[in-house]
Every structure is written in structure tokens, then in C-alpha cells.
Amino acid sequence: MKHLLFTLGLGLCTLASMAQPEMKPVGGTGPMISLDKEVHDYGTMKQGGDGNCEFTVTNTGDQPLIISQCQGSCGCTVPQCETAPIKPGTKSVIKVKYDSNRVGPINKSVTITSNATNAPSKVITIKGTIEAAPTTPTSPEKEASPMAPAEKH
């Protein structure tokens, strides 16, 4: 009798576990934002160099993620975000362009505003140093050659 009850109990447990809904391969309820990196380091670059970089956004939630705004900390940092909904498990790219004509250290940020349940406002950073471009010496004025014909007045 104990063996029969044990077998029935085990069978019910097995059926109950099979009836559980399948878990999705995402991280949470609602839209959730995840980034491949939070800081992009340009290192040292020459003035006027390529100031472009990208951040990859992944929706790790179970609802569409909508990025409503990307705002640079100043006019020299210009982000570009897709506003189309990002489906669960898919990716989008945020492009950032820094005006590398400014010499000196860089430490700028971009604020991403979205409907993410885990971080409705997320800040990413760009950093590095811009070195002045080498200056080209101006050519000296040409002196009149003693062999050149004299100008007539």
C-alpha cells in the first residue's frame, strides 16, 4: 500500500511539473534594458579624429522596450537612438558622435530614457583625450631673386 501511494504521489508531482508554463529565455517582467558596455574609452586620439562609437542595447524583458529619448550632456556629444520598439530578446544600437575638434580630456555622458522596468533612465559615458593636431609651419615669404627681371614703374 505504501508503495502504491508513493508511486501515485510521484506521478502527480511529475504531471504538475509538466503543466508549468514554459519559461522564456529573458530576464524579467516588462521591458528591461541591458547594454553591452556603459563606458566607451576613445583612449588618445588626434584632433579631428573619428569621434563615433556605438552602444548595443538588448531588451532582456518580456515586453517591447521603447527608447523615448537619448540626450547628450552637451552640444559636442550627439547621440542617435532608434525609437521603434525593441522586441524581447532583440537588440538595437545607439550611435554617439563626439566633436573631436575640441582639444583636451573627454568625459561626457548620454542619458537614455525608456520604458524599462529595471532602469527607466540609464546613463552611458564616453571618455578619452584629444591631442592637438600638429601645426604646419607657414612658408617664409619669397625674397626677390637678384636674377629676376626688375619691375618697371
Image: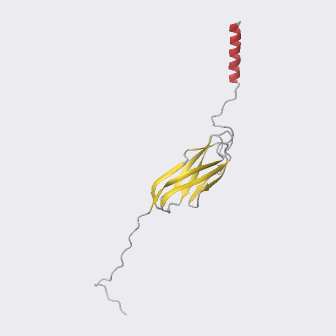
The image quarter in which residue 143 lies: bottom left
- Name the one closer to the observer, 91 or 40: 40
Residue 69 position within the rendered picture, expressed as x and y whole percent measured from the top left = 65, 53
What residue is drawn where x is 48% and y is 62%?
103
Q: Is residue 5 above or below residue 76?
A: above
Question: Number of numbered discs present?
Answer: 0
27 relative position to 98: left or right: right
Q: How is the image coloured?
A: secondary structure
Q: Quadrant of the N terminus?
A: top right
Q: Is residue 122 above or below residue 21?
A: below
Residue 145 position within the rendered picture, expressed as x and y whole percent measured from the top left = 30, 83
Q: Quadrant of the C terminus?
A: bottom left
What residue is drawn where x is 66% and y is 48%?
114
Residue 28 position within the rendered picture, expressed as x and y whole percent measured from the top left = 66, 37
The image quarter in which residue 97 lies: bottom right
What residue is drawn where x is 68% and y is 12%?
7
Q: Is residue 17 above or below residue 62?
A: above
Residue 127 position within the rendered picture, expressed as x and y whole percent measured from the top left = 51, 53
- Name the one closer to the observer, 30 or 15: 30
What residue is drawn where x is 60% and y is 50%?
123
- Name the one closer to the observer, 143 or 134: 134
In the picture as drawn, the residue positioned furthest to the bottom comes out as: 153
The image quarter in which residue 90 lies: top right
Q: Is residue 142 above or below residue 68?
A: below
In the picture as drawn, the residue positioned furthest to the top comes out as: 1
